[in-house]
Image (cartoon, rainbow, N blue to C red):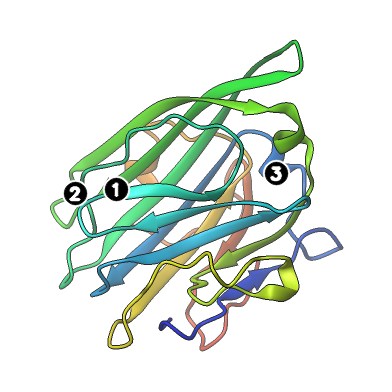
Amino acid sequence: QFTDKSYGIQVPIGGENGLSENVLNGDYTIGMWVKTNADICRLFTIVKEGDHYVDLVKGRYRMDLGGRMGSFYYPGLEKIPNNDSWNYVFFRREKGASDGGTFSGNCTIGLIDEDGKLHTSSYGIYELSADVQNKPKALVIGMQKLDESLGLSPEDRTTMSQDSTLLIDEFRVYSRALSDNEIPRSYDRMLSGNEQGIALYWPMNERYPTGY
């Protein structure tokens, strides 16, 4: 459970038990179950070197990417988790060709509602090569109060209200872009940890996340 005072849970990058930094520089899919009564909140944040970060934000009317991340063009997903039910939310990135010092590719924000219906919004992205090459420093789940030790400015905030809560369950990261056909087949079941491309899996069955 996260509140407006939460610094979030940091996923380790590198090391024997950490998430490889190469995962977040290539194709990947991040998925989680979400339940919140907040009008605005961060679901996850990827912090990179060089004062760059990207986060998936649940807004009042849609979900968007936010942060400092170079140049993006995207339409947000005009579907948000319902206040009184659990919804599965995911973000998928697929790298495109690099040409002349630039990078292009596709990103998708997706949600599976309480009736099992899949909603997605995909868009092309264009980034400066420096943004792509910068190494990830941290992947943070549920960070509402920005951690200045990660180089984030406290002025960059989502204004989550004090009486709001965010619940996250079954957090998973894949080192590949799962298709729209694959995600509905696995979103509502616990994983074994041996699935193709699974890079990190936190079932959130304990007070603190275990197992990855």
Give the farthest residue toward the front: 155
Lower position in the chain sequence, tag 1 or tag 3: 3
Q: Residue at x 76, y 42 (%)?
A: 22
User: Is residue 185 placed above or below 191 in the rendered structure?
Assistant: above
Mark 1 Cα shell of 10 Å, populated few (<14), some (14-19), many (≥20): many
Reading the image, the residue beneath label 3 is 23
Q: Which residue is mark 2?
A: 116
User: From mark 3 to mark 2, how far is it between C-alphas?
Assistant: 28 Å
Q: Can you give x and y, in whole percent of width and height, for residue 175 in the image?
A: 63, 41
68 up-or-down from 121: above or below: below
Amino acid type of disc 2?
Gly
> In the rendered view, does 125 fall on the left or right side of 32?
right
**Which is more foreground, mark 3 or mark 2?**
3
Q: Amino acid at mark 3?
A: Val
SS of the residue under disc 1: strand
Q: Is residue 121 left or right of residue 201?
A: left
Query: Looking at the image, which residue is at 75% across and 10% down?
Result: 100
In the rendering, at what x and y percent does residue 160 appear?
36, 75
Name the secondary structure under disc 3. Answer: helix
Residue 181 location, x and y as percent? 35, 31
Picture residue at 23% right of the left edge, 75% below the top: 37
| Quadrant of residue 168 within the rendered picture | bottom left
From the image, tell me which residue sits under label 1. 111
Q: Name the residue nearer the viewer: 130 or 114.
A: 130
Task: Tell me the quadrant of the picture where the N terminus can be found.
Answer: bottom left
Classify residue 83 by image quadrant. bottom left
Image spot of residue 63 (x, y percent): 32, 50
Judge by depth and name the residue closer to the eye, 71 or 179: 71
**Amino acid type, mark 1:** Leu
